Image (tube, rainbow, N blue to C red):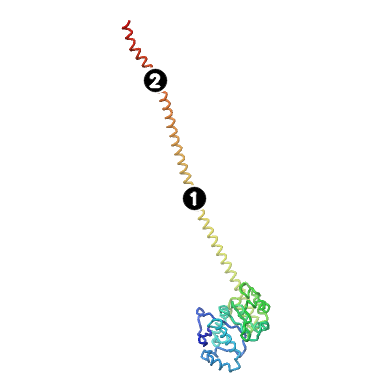
Amino acid sequence: MRLLELSPGGKCTLTRNLDHNKVPPYAILSHTWQHGQEVTYEDLIRGKRSLSPPYRQRSQRQASNAAGWRKVDFCLAQTRQDGLRHCWIDSCCINKAHPDEKHGAFNAMYSWYQNAHVCYVYLQDVLVVEDLVGSRWWTRGWTLQELLAPSRVVFFSGDGVQLGDKVSLQHVIHSITRISNEVLVGSQPLAEITIEEKLSWMKGRQTTFEEDWAYCLQGILGFEMSRRYGEGRLRAIERLKKEAARRATELRETELKRRQENANRRNEKRSSAKSKKLCGAGRSSTSSNGRHTTKKHTSSSSRRQNEKAASAKAKWRIRSHHDRKATRRSPCLAILLLIILVQIMVLPCQGRLG
């Protein structure tokens, strides 16, 4: 991708062909071509790739491309005003004499508009916003993607006066193009729109080559197809529909496969969680049974100990009872023994007295 680069000193040059991952922020121009009046890549090469004022003044003396230079001057001035240093214009930033570069630019065009910081729509046949409806810009095929791809689209009159942007003019644009406001402001993705509705947006639009009527929809439909100039518009549209149907089938199959994989992953997670739960319950049950068994053994042991204690206490009570009975008998025996002893001692004394 080549860009027009503005230097701080006011000089403008054409950059080398930049890699897609090294492209700086840039503005992009949308316009309708005027045969023989556009500034081309060859014009810049003849000027040593410089758009410095002396070369531009010499070129503007040629009435044949004065209108083209007005577009370039407008784009460069608006780019600088918006604080950007780079811009892209399809008429002079593509070397159309190089087949590979031309083919690559054709396939990348939608993404270039989509990635632009801002898109300037230059309406050379409009002076005031009331004239917007009658502009030729709405009748060209390629301008459809230039309306839909960029997130920010600003409309300008032929005098360079800003008329509004895609959001502020959405109702006017809808009345002209039949494109819903949701699509225009970006709240509804293009992927959700059917191919039939997208084809209806092309109603009333024309292209220089009849096959381009179908080819200019590739970016909007989200795929590329080979260009076969000479096959005719109807054949190109037929191939476009077949390719769109094939892609839609692939997307459905991919989506179904993705959903099935997600469902399988969810089932695996549920199974894993259930297994962990069962294992946890098993460990808990084993632990609980162990506690119950221990408690049971402990209860049995305590019961035996209690029985032993009760038996010992009963025996102690019996011994105590016998001891108390024996203790109660002891005074009687002592008295009896004392009486016997006294009698034994008294009897000899009575004999002597007698």
Question: Which residue is under mark 1?
Answer: 284
Q: Earlier in the sequence, mark 1 or mark 2?
A: 1
Can you tell which quarter of the image residue 343 is in?
top left
Amino acid identity at mark 1: Ser
| For the residues bearing labels 1 and 2, Cβ distance under 8 angstroms | no
Vertical side of 279 occupied by 293: above or below? above
Residue farthest along the top direction in this orientation: 354
Front position among marks 1 and 2? 2
Question: Which residue is under mark 2?
Answer: 331
Image point (45%, 36%), residue name: 306
Q: Secondary structure at mark 1?
A: helix
Q: Secondary structure at mark 2?
A: helix
Give the class, few, some or many, for how many residues have Cα within 10 Å of label 1's Cα (few <14, many ≥20). Answer: few
Work out whether residue 230 can be spotted.
no
Residue farthest along the front direction in this orientation: 353
Work out whether residue 66 can be spotted.
yes
Amino acid identity at mark 2: Pro
Position of residue 352 measured from the top left corner of the image (x, y, whole percent): 31, 7
